[in-house]
Amino acid sequence: MPDLLNALGAPLTHRIRHWVLSAFPRGESGIDYDHPPGDPGWFGPDSVAWRVHAEFPGMLAGGLCALMLQTLHPLALAGVHDHSNFREDLVGRLRRTTAFVAGTSYAGDAEVRRLVGRVRAIHSRVHGQLPDGRRYAADDPALLTWVHVTEAYGFLQGCRRYCRDVPVAIADRYYDETRRIAEALGATKVPCSEAEVAAYFAQQRPLLRVDERSREVLAVLQGIRLPVPAAGLSRELFLGAGAALLPDWAQDLLQPGRRARLQARAAAATLRPLAPLFRRALGDGVAARACQRVGVDASVLRHWPQ
């Protein structure tokens, strides 16, 4: 029976693989995932991070959820709004962010340090002033914490909703593991459990709002066209799935209408059954290469560590 199911799913699996590799081509980042042999990098095969970050549907939907959350913080948004070419090259920005997350997750120690150093250098040059006079800097520890928490929240919830169940103890371990990257970039007071993340969001909520700048970035995001087949349908599926991951308070700000919430729920219901096909289609990705580098079978990633 498994052979029959594999045969029936093969055409769809092939289409999914083509879709993903069209949107996020391999080999363009210059990141070395194969050397040096035995180097576990900053996480390794016993980590929760290696498992969560191997789930493509959860990572893409979760990343889009994080971007939506990040538009709510005026100071964090300012660096993107004033200093990036997101209007002309949002796809490129998404690819670069994806490469950084993949690289810091799965590459060896020296490569991770190189990636972190490069981003720190970029952040040091990004600073300015909002129209209301408030100053911002991309290397502000508080803003780095906000960006990290929104991403970690999105990735974890994406995995939990679309890919596999995530017990609270595993979620706490994920937050505790991944704060290492945030702290290396300069973040401070980084939450390290689900309870701490919930408390952190409650603390940040008075600072958050939807304004003209956030609407502009959201409009660009909602119009993104990845270079893939059925680009419009793909965008609606993953943006809707990302929106479905938003906390209730963020949905109230970003999706006040009933129709938008219904569309998000429909996208979420569509994406969940596709997760096993994504896993099958992308079994030779960077997670598998990292496993090979350290001498373990990639099948260990199918189960939570003890």
Image (cartoon, grey):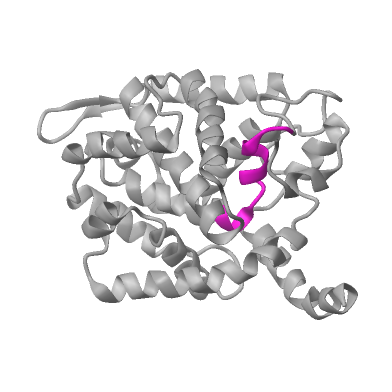
**Quadrant of the image for the N terminus?**
bottom right
Question: Up-down: is 134 above or below 77?
Answer: above
Q: Which residues are magenta?
A: 46-58
Q: Residue furthest left?
A: 132
Q: Position of residue 3 (x, y in %)?
A: 89, 74
Q: Is residue 75 left or right of residue 37?
A: left
**Is residue 171 or residue 262 the one in the foreground?**
171
Q: From the viewer's perspective, tell me whether residue 129 is left or right of residue 32.
A: left
> Could you tell me how many numbered marks the image carries?
0
Residue 52 appears at what percent x and percent y? 61, 45
Residue 53 visible to an observer of this rendering = no
Where in the figure is residue 255, as x and y percent of width and height? 26, 63
- Image height check: is 196 above or below 268? above
Q: Does 19 appear above or below 10?
A: above
Residue, x 48% and y 40% (percent of image)?
152
Principal secondary structure, stretch drawn in magenta: helix
In the rendered structure, the answer to whether residue 50 lies left or right of residue 215 reads right
**Which image quadrant is residue 189 in?**
top left
Q: Residue 123: percent from the left, percent from the top?
A: 41, 24
Q: Is residue 245 magenta?
A: no
Name the residue: 77% across, 76% down: 9
**Left or right position of 137 against 123:** left
